Amino acid sequence: MRSTTLFSTARVLIVTGKGGTGKTTVSGVLANLAAREGLRAMVFQIGAPGARYEPGTVQLARLFGSDEVLGYEASVLVANAAGGSVHARAVTPDTALVEYLHLHGMRRLSRRLVNSGALDVVATAVPGMPDMLVLGKLKQMERAAAAGQPEAPDVILLDAPAAGHAVRFLQSPRGLLEAAGGGPVRAQAEEVVQMLSDPQRCRVVLVTTPEETPVSETVETAQLLERRAGVSILAVVVNGRLPVLSLPSEPEAAGLDALARAAGVRLGRQQLEGLVAAARLRLERQEVQAAQVARLGRELALPQLELPFCFDADLRPQQLATLTDALSTAVAAGLEVAP
């Protein structure tokens, strides 16, 4: 599966995973790969009503070498000679509501809501409405892309809530569809449900790390998303896979000392003991990760795309380039995507 095929499967990719598995990073890596292919990618992040910014927006911008705090207006994070670019914006329910009112000729009402301080209340008054407003904005952007409107993105990536909330988030339009008898809310819900349930328009990318709990939650989330939210899953990104080192099955000081001497390094007793302990720990982690990746494959019949573990606390453009190279290699490995 070439990366161009990856992005031609659907215009909208919703990225979710257990908290801490790196879904924001993966969103950035996917967008960067799309830009390398000469595509215009847009990354959406979700903010709380009334929030000035979300911490994740800073994390995403730093991947591209910027310390900019993302807002509702799109920011250009990168543009390349191939014509590709990555844009990003933070969407909150209240700002999405204002834009919705503007598009439907209700600017005076939106100004009153803003001036009275009631905007947040209205945007969150109905259960599921905040999620619906954000997804409605996503649907609007997807329609613009489908129509080939100028400046519309080729690929739209939503850095969605963590897996524990993603199912509820993507279920909200269906809940509103059942609750609303008619009117603009029901019409909006119908359009969003149509987008989410069409695999040629929208798919989910799950993110996990090769550990027991994240893998278990990923399997459960995949089943719930397809059954309750009706969305198709494109692939699972296994993030943070340690490079496999060729180490003795039973590391011991003498053998490691011989390897060190062959490399022209002399180690003291304490250093050798520490090296033995580190080798045993690395072997253990490699075995655990391999077992969990294999279990993921058995329990979830989806393509797996692996990203390596980055030994850096702060991910910046250098690490982004490394991860993008790894993703490109994984995609090109011949993975098949179900239609």
Image: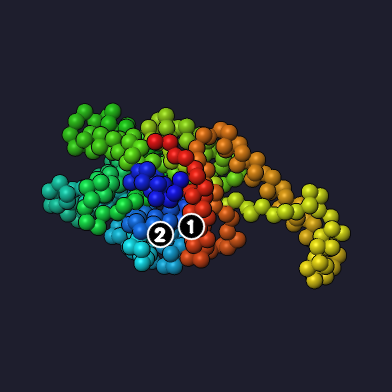
Q: Number of labelled discs?
A: 2
Label 1 CA crowd tier, 10 Å (few <14, some 14–19, many 20+): many
Q: Quadrant of the C terminus?
A: top left
The amino acid on which the numbered mark 1 sits, given as a three-letter code, is: Thr
The numbered dot on residue 36 is 2
The numbered dot on residue 324 is 1
Residue 218 spot, x, y in % from top left: 52, 39
Of the two numbered discs 2 and 1 on the same chain, state the one appearing first in sequence.
2
* Image quadrant in which you'd find residue 189: top left
Callouts 2 and 1 close, C-beta under 8 Å: yes
Report the side of 81 relative to 23 (left or right).
left
Report the side of 301 relative to 157 (left or right).
right
Q: What residue sits 47% from the left and 32% below the top?
A: 223
Which sits in the foreground, 173 or 123?
Answer: 173
Which sits in the foreground, 211 or 69?
Answer: 211
The numbered dot on residue 50 is none
The amino acid on which the numbered mark 2 sits, given as a three-letter code, is: Arg
Q: Is residue 197 above or below residue 42?
A: above
Q: Is residue 150 above or below residue 229?
A: below
The colour scheme used to paint the residues is: rainbow
Residue 41 spot, x, y in % from top left: 35, 55
Q: Is residue 71 something one can see in this rendering?
A: no
* Helix, strand or loop status at disc 1: helix
Q: Is residue 293 something one can see in this rendering?
A: yes
Residue 42 spot, x, y in % from top left: 34, 55
Q: What residue sits 83% from the left and 67% below the top?
A: 261
Residue 118 spot, x, y in % from top left: 24, 49
Label 2 CA crowd tier, 10 Å (few <14, some 14–19, many 20+): many
* Image quadrant in which you'd find residue 130: top left
Report the side of 150 relative to 298 (left or right).
left
Q: CA distance from mark 2 to mark 1?
A: 9 Å
